[in-house]
Amino acid sequence: MAKPEKSPDTGNVQHAAGWQHFPEFEKVLTENPPPILARVEKTCRQLNDLVQAGSEDDKQRARLAMTAYGRSLELFRVLCEARDKAGQQS
């Protein structure tokens, strides 16, 4: 287990697990529109094709994957709203 350290910025105790900085995640939240959304849309179209014409097993897996993508997009929306709200308060 990582040893807790004090943050130099806030003095709060943190675990040295790299929670402070996620460059790829930050990049996604700062690009407008983020390229990942186009990839998600393309993948969802392919999954929809499987739902329409795939085997029963493929249809089930495609439905589950589309559900996961939908939840991810909802999380992305929530994070963007939080980012925008934090920007307005600054």
Image: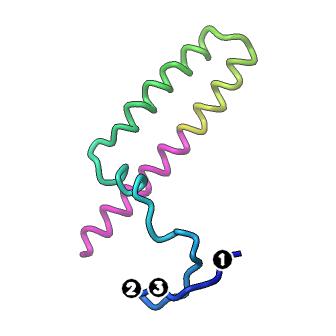
In this picture, residue 77 sits left or right of residue 52: left
Tell me the CA gap for discs 1 and 2.
19 Å
Magenta region, residue range: 70-90
Tell me if residue 29 comes above or below residue 41 in the rendering.
below
Residue at 51% over, 88% down: 6
Q: Which residue is mark 3?
A: 7
Which image quadrant is residue 82 in?
bottom left
**Position in image of residue 39 (x %, y %):** 42, 31
Q: Which residue is mark 1?
A: 2
Label 1–label 2 contact, CB within 8 A? no
Tell me the CA gap for discs 1 and 3.
14 Å
Tell me the CA gap for discs 3 and 2.
5 Å
Q: Secondary structure at mark 1?
A: loop
Tell me if residue 35 comes above or below residue 22 in the rendering.
above
Q: The residue under label 1 is which amino acid type?
A: Ala
Q: Secondary structure at mark 2?
A: loop
Image quadrant holding the C terminus, namely bottom left
**Position in image of residue 58 (x %, y %):** 69, 18
**Position in image of residue 36 (x %, y %):** 40, 38
Mark 1 or mark 2, which has the lower sequence index?
A: 1
Q: Residues within 10 Å of mark 3 (few under 14, many from 20)?
A: few
Q: Is residue 21 within the magenta segment? A: no
Label 3–label 2 contact, CB within 8 A? yes
Q: Which residue is mark 2?
A: 9
Mark 1 or mark 3, which has the lower sequence index?
A: 1
Residue at 34% over, 62% down: 83
